[in-house]
Image (tube, rainbow, N blue to C red):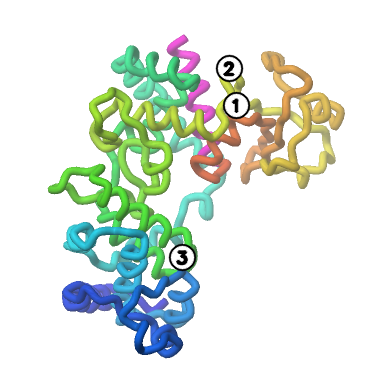
Amino acid sequence: MRLTLLSAVIITASLTACSASQTPVLPAKLLADTPAAQQTAAVRLSVADLQREFPADSRTAEQFPAYAEQLKAMARQEGIKESTLTRAFENFHFIERVITSDKNQPEKKVTLDDYLSHRVTKGAVSAAVKQHDANAALLAGISQRYGVPQEYIVSLWGLESGFGRYQGKEDVISALATLAYEGRREEMFVKQFIAALQIIDQGHIPADQQLKGSWAGAMGQNQFMPTSYLTYAVDGDGDGVVDIWNNKADVFASTANYLATEGWVKALPWGYEVTVPAGFDRSIEGTKKNQSKTLAQWKALGVTLPAQANLPESTPMWLVVPEDKQARVYLVTQNFNTIMHWNRSYFFALSVSLMADNVGAEIR
């Protein structure tokens, strides 16, 4: 995509003019195919329409304002109010650095060894224990309510935002529109863009607050994507507001609710590092449903668990083999898969799991 910093300046200027119009600019093909009498009526746009009108391999900076108008039209289709669009697009702009970030994500550049050495450190574990102790009563109550151990809640909190310190400073609406325009995962980011507008439209943030988050559109102290906020975020202290940016009760309860909703099994460990015999077929690894075997079946294949493992032989488990200099292998349970639902990354799920193990050992 031919998008440069100079282009971003052109985009910002162009968007000011485009945002003044409340009438969506319909794709040329749609206008041609629509009877004149119906052209003023609502025409339902889809991502496929965007892709036809703006082919991904030929998108230019100059087209971004028109693309943004089409996103507005799609938002109106979903019932987003004009006042919400005006507010959301007040500081709307193309953000070139989010595309750079999207193309340079850690797992493409590092191994598990590198990742864990920066994420699950003695300092990080110590900080998580201190945060647990400072919020012990609140965490204990939420853990009891949702059946999710405190160490997982506090580990996710620390790994996602440094216990709320790093929530991201990007304009979420602009970031998601930019990523949609990039085209690599357009359908996903258009969906997140609409969901972000719904958060504003439904009054979940104060009128004077801009929706801020990471370059990928993740928000708050638990870095929920907009659809996750709408699905899992809950009011943890009964004050009638769901505030994952400032309210720790809401942050902890929303995190626990996410895991509980997605299949967390109470009192089940996430898994274990295991050994496999020489010549073991590692291609059978994976966390899809049809790749599970019972613990007894894995043992029959020669997989050896550590001495402290104490699970029923009928427990469904999956083999995980991350990119790793040490060639480590893990046998994981449903709870690991639940963490994977949060973030589809072996590295991330292992960092959460190992952090929780270390924190749990300190607070028990």
User: Residue 350, how many percent across, how many down?
Assistant: 55, 34
Along the line of sight, which residue is nearer the eye, 167 or 279?
A: 167
Amino acid type of the residue that numbered disc 1 sits on in the rendered structure: Trp
The part of the chain drawn in magenta is: 347-364
Type of secondary structure dominating the magenta stretch: helix
Quick one: SS at disc 1? loop
- Dot 1 alpha-carbon crowd within 10 angstroms: few under 14, some 14 to 19, many 20 or more: many
Q: Which residue is mark 1?
A: 270
Which circle marks residue 267 in the picture? 2
- Look at 62% across and 42% down and name the residue there: 324
Residue 359 is a magenta residue: yes
Quick one: SS at disc 2? loop
**In screen coordinates, is 43 left or right of 361?**
left
Q: Disc 3 and disc 1: Cα gap in Å?
A: 33 Å
Amino acid type of the residue that numbered disc 3 sits on in the rendered structure: Glu
Q: Nearer the viewer, mark 3 or mark 1?
A: 3
Query: Mark 2 near mark 1, Cβ–Cβ under 8 Å?
Result: no
Would residue 77 be visible to someone looking at this image? yes
Q: Which residue is mark 3?
A: 186
Q: Disc 3 and disc 2: Cα gap in Å?
A: 39 Å
